[in-house]
Image (cartoon, rainbow, N blue to C red):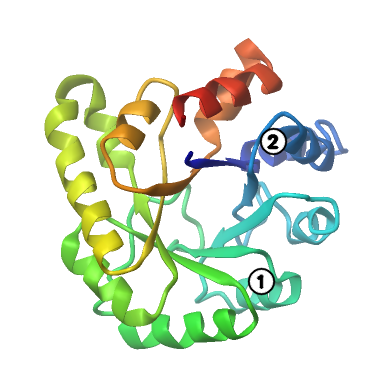
Amino acid sequence: MTKLSVNINKIATIRNSRGGNTPNLLQVAQDAERFGAQGITVHPRPDERHIRYQDVYDLKPLLKTEFNIEGNPKIQKFVDLVLDIKPEQVTLVPDGDNQLTSDHGWDTIANKDYLTEIISRFKQAGIRTSIFVDADLKMIEGAKATGTDRIELYTEEYAKQYSTNKEAVIIPFSNATKLANQLGLGVNGGHDLNLENLAYFKNNTQNLLEVSIGHALISDSLYFGLENTIQLYLKQLK
């Protein structure tokens, strides 16, 4: 079964919009685990507009499942945070400083030397590494050359075309997972996956280990409640 990691950035966004501590981010993370989530994902950004760096420190001793920290390793504060926290997984994302949300994967060929060096640092600290990439076979081959443990496929293009062209749009993702598995890379997925498109993605890719879902899952929980929503997502991954 593909694991579900719940991205709690949106909970932090709501909290920060009013100040104070409502909703309680730490409690939501613990509840998500209790309701069946197999991991918690956070993506701290330099402006701390949602997840704050202190949140990451506060979460670490509370979590019982996999802790996945996403971010841009070209930001030294992020690197220092990850090496200090030592989560189970770090996902490297090529975000700009003021980026609204992630919108592209790494050019693993142009950034090979840099990625190889930073991945080596994380792996020496005992942290599993994953690189955010597009469903581009050359970029996946490039990812293999960096020494990363996994890739995370950027799935926005799949999500955008799912309702009108799912049979065609899944092909590059299916091919990408096949190649990654042949190369010995683990495969994660994330971005705009939801209750409508998740099962088809999982069933038409090869050995998908984990998905990280935040925006859609938290939005669905407004209607269904967090516990029911997590169970609905887990059902799509069976």
Quarter-of-image position of residue 195: top left
Look at 26% across and 36% down and name the residue there. 204
User: Mark 2 against mark 1, which lies toward the viewer?
Assistant: 1
> Could you tell me residue 110's position as x and y percent?
25, 79
Label 2 sits on residue: 11
Residue at the top extreme?
223
Q: Callout 1, which amino acid?
A: Val
Residue at 33% over, 55% down: 104
Which of disc 1 and disc 2 is earlier in sequence?
2
Residue assigned mark 1: 82
Residue 117 seen from this side = yes
Side of 236 where 75 appears, left or right: right
Whether label 2 touches label 1, CB < 8 Å: no
Could you say whether the residue bearing mark 1 is in a helix, strand or loop? helix
Q: CA distance from mark 2 to mark 1?
A: 21 Å
**In the displayed image of the protein, which residue is found farthest to the left?**
168
Q: Judge whether 47 appears above or below 10 on screen.
A: below
| Percent x, y of residue 126 | 63, 77
For residue 217, side relative to residue 117 (left or right): right
Disc 2 residue type? Ile
